[in-house]
Amino acid sequence: MNVSRMIRIIAGFFIMLSLAMAHYSGQVDFAQAKWLWFTAFVGANLFQSGFTKFCLMANILKALGVKE
């Protein structure tokens, strides 16, 4: 598995996880909104990496030895 594929998997997992946490948090709406900020953070990083070609997760995965 290469870095590009791993990034897509990790980003998709984080987005689904944060949406599930927002949905099932069982707290007041404010607690649910906190999890949605995490979703926005992941989406913003995907968006900026499309323009700048910089992705911190890619650098971390390469340092861990994942094939490019």
Image (tube, rainbow, N blue to C red):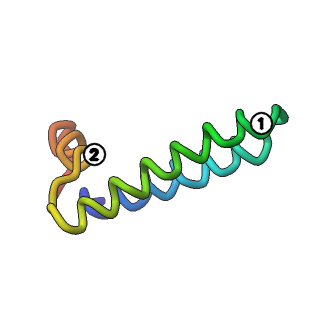
Picture coordinates of residue 30 (x, y %)? Answer: 72, 36
Q: Badge 1, how many Cα within 10 Å: few under 14, some, many 20+?
A: few
Q: Quadrant of residue 65?
A: top left
Mark nearest the camera among 1 and 2 is 1
Q: Badge 2, how many Cα within 10 Å: few under 14, some, many 20+?
A: some
Q: In terms of secondary structure, where does tag 1 sit? A: loop
| Residue 30 or residue 15, whichever sits in front | 30
**17 with respect to 61 (left or right):** right
Above/below status of 65 relative to 46? above
Give the total of numbered labels.
Answer: 2
Picture coordinates of residue 33 (x, y %)? Answer: 66, 42
Q: Which residue sits at x=37%, y=56%?
A: 44
Above/below status of 56 relative to 12? above
Q: Name the residue under label 1.
A: 25
Above/below status of 11 relative to 4? above
Picture coordinates of residue 54 (x, y %)? Answer: 16, 54
Above/below status of 41 relative to 63? below
Disc marking residue 33: none
Q: Name the residue under label 2.
A: 57
**51 with respect to 7 (left or right):** left
Q: Which residue sits at x=71%, y=40%?
A: 32
Instruction: Quadrant for the C terminus, please.
Output: bottom left
Instruction: Quadrant for the N terminus, please.
Output: bottom left
**Amino acid type at mark 2:** Met
| Residue 25 or residue 28, whichever sits in front | 28
Q: In terms of secondary structure, where does tag 2 sit? A: helix
Cα distance, mark 1 to mark 2?
27 Å
Sooner in the amino-acid sequence: mark 1 or mark 2: 1
Asked whether the beta carbons under mark 1 and mark 2 sit within 8 Å of each other, the answer is: no
**Amino acid type at mark 1:** Ser
